[in-house]
Amino acid sequence: MSGEVDACRADVWLWRARFFKTRALAASFLERGRVRLTRTGQQHRLDKPARPIKVGDQLVFALGGRLIAVRVVGLGDRRGPAEEARTLYADLDTGGPATSEAAT
């Protein structure tokens, strides 16, 4: 049996991917229903920080005046450096890695 995790809390993933400086900011953003999740062709609005994020999910949200659309390609084990965070997602606009900037 594998010890790999197949899901991650939405607030933790957004924090690990460096879209937010703190988990509290990510949780607040999610509680306001500002993130749209697409999984297996169905769209859902994330409204709780504990909602699971899985590899292959697509997230769309507006942050800092930009519309961000990413596909989850990894869950991560920690909040590492920016280079590591960029390996957790692919930008859907270009199909390649996206750049994230921490929210203030």
Image (cartoon, rainbow, N blue to C red):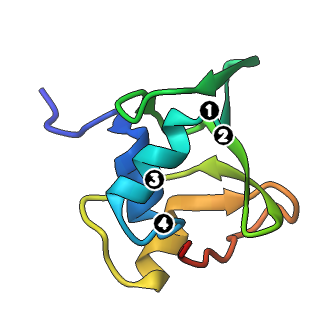
Q: Label 3, secondary structure: give it.
A: helix
Q: Which residue is mark 1?
A: 33
Residue at which label 4 appears: 20
Residue 69, placed above or below residue 22? above
Amino acid on which the number 1 mark rests in the picture: Gly
Q: Tell me, for residue 26, which label it has, or none.
A: 3
Q: Amino acid at mark 4?
A: Phe
Residue 15 x %, y %: 40, 61
Q: Earlier in the sequence, mark 4 or mark 1?
A: 4
**Distance between mark 3 and mark 2 Cα atoms:** 10 Å
Give the crowd class for mark 1: few <14, some 14-19, many >=20 residues within 10 Å. some
Residue neighbourhood size for the residue with mark 3, other residues' Cα within 10 Å, grouped as few (<14), some (14–19), many (≥20): many
Upstream in sequence: badge 4 or badge 2 = 4
Judging from the image, what secondary structure is the residue with disc 2 in? loop
Spatial separation of the CA atoms under disc 3 and disc 1 = 11 Å
- Circle 1/circle 2 CB separation < 8 Å: yes
Q: Which residue is mark 2?
A: 34
